[in-house]
Image: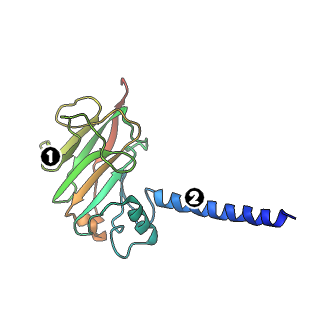
Amino acid sequence: MFRVPLLVALALAIAFGGGIGVTLSALNASAGMGAVRVGVWSAFPEAQLASADPYAKSHRARAGRLLYGSAEGLIFTARTDDSGQRLTGTCSYRIRGASPPARLWTLYAADAGGLPLQTPAGLPGAINSLTVLRDGDGLFDITISPTAQPMNWIALPDTGGFQLVMTLFDTPASGNSGLIGFEMPSVAAIGCGDE
């Protein structure tokens, strides 16, 4: 007597629950449609366009942040080092490379939601292309570590996983043709814990 209504209710619960779960996982995806990967760095250059796919628009709306216009800037994120290991606050990392083609760039460590990590007062939490020190070849080394380092250093609070956020302002990489021969700095682990 209650068999048919029970089966209908079960089917509806599975359909709605599965649909909501798949939609949330698509919105929380860090790489997907329109993603551009350069080494360990990824960006979504088309996410801010009016012609963006529905998932990119939903991801943007859910995050509740304004994105830069295609001619203004591009945000690259890295969640792993060059060996594929997740970035963690108990390790130290070295970012090495030449400045990407941009009028200005910034780099900071962020939580999973993209918000900058809180560093103790007076310690550097970010660096940019105007303040970074370079060697004779024009390359830079930036150390991201919980302990103080000489030269370019970003303080890393003792946290779990984090991501690196490098924002390029006024860059040719915003257009697809600007990605030809485009390189981003390497991210290498240089020690964890007491190493």
**Eyeballing the image, is 64 above or below 191?**
below
The residue carrying mark 1 is: 137
Q: Which mark is residue 21?
A: 2
Residue 180 visible within the image: no
Q: Circle 2 — which element?
A: helix
Name the residue nearer the viewer: 60 or 32: 60
Q: Is residue 27 left or right of residue 194?
A: right
Mark 1 crowd level (few <14, some 14–19, many ≥20, 10 Å Cα): few
Mark whose residue sits in front, 2 or 1: 2
**Image mark for residue 163:** none
On the image, the x and y values in percent for residue 73 come to 24, 63
Residue 10 in percent (x, y) is at 73, 61
In the rendered image, residue 68, in percent from the top left (x then y), is placed at 26, 64
Going 30% across and 58% down the picture, which residue do you hit? Answer: 75
Residue 189 appears in the picture as rendered: yes
In three-dimensional space, the C-alpha distance between marks 2 and 1, rounded to whole angstroms, equals: 50 Å
> Which picture quadrant has residue 153?
top left
* Type of the residue with mark 2: Gly
Say above or below: 145 vs 169.
above
Rendered image quadrant of residue 3: bottom right
The quadrant the C terminus occupies is: top left
* Quadrant housing the N terminus: bottom right
Whole-percent x, y for residue 179 in the image: 29, 64
Under mark 1, the amino acid is: Asp
Report whether 62 appears left or right of 95: right
- Furthest-bottom residue in this view: 51
| SS class, disc 1 | loop
Q: Is residue 93 above or below residue 15?
A: above
Q: Residue at x 52, y 59 (%)?
A: 24
Relative to 77, 16 lies left or right: right
Above or below for 14 versus 189: below
Name, please, the residue furthest toward the right.
1
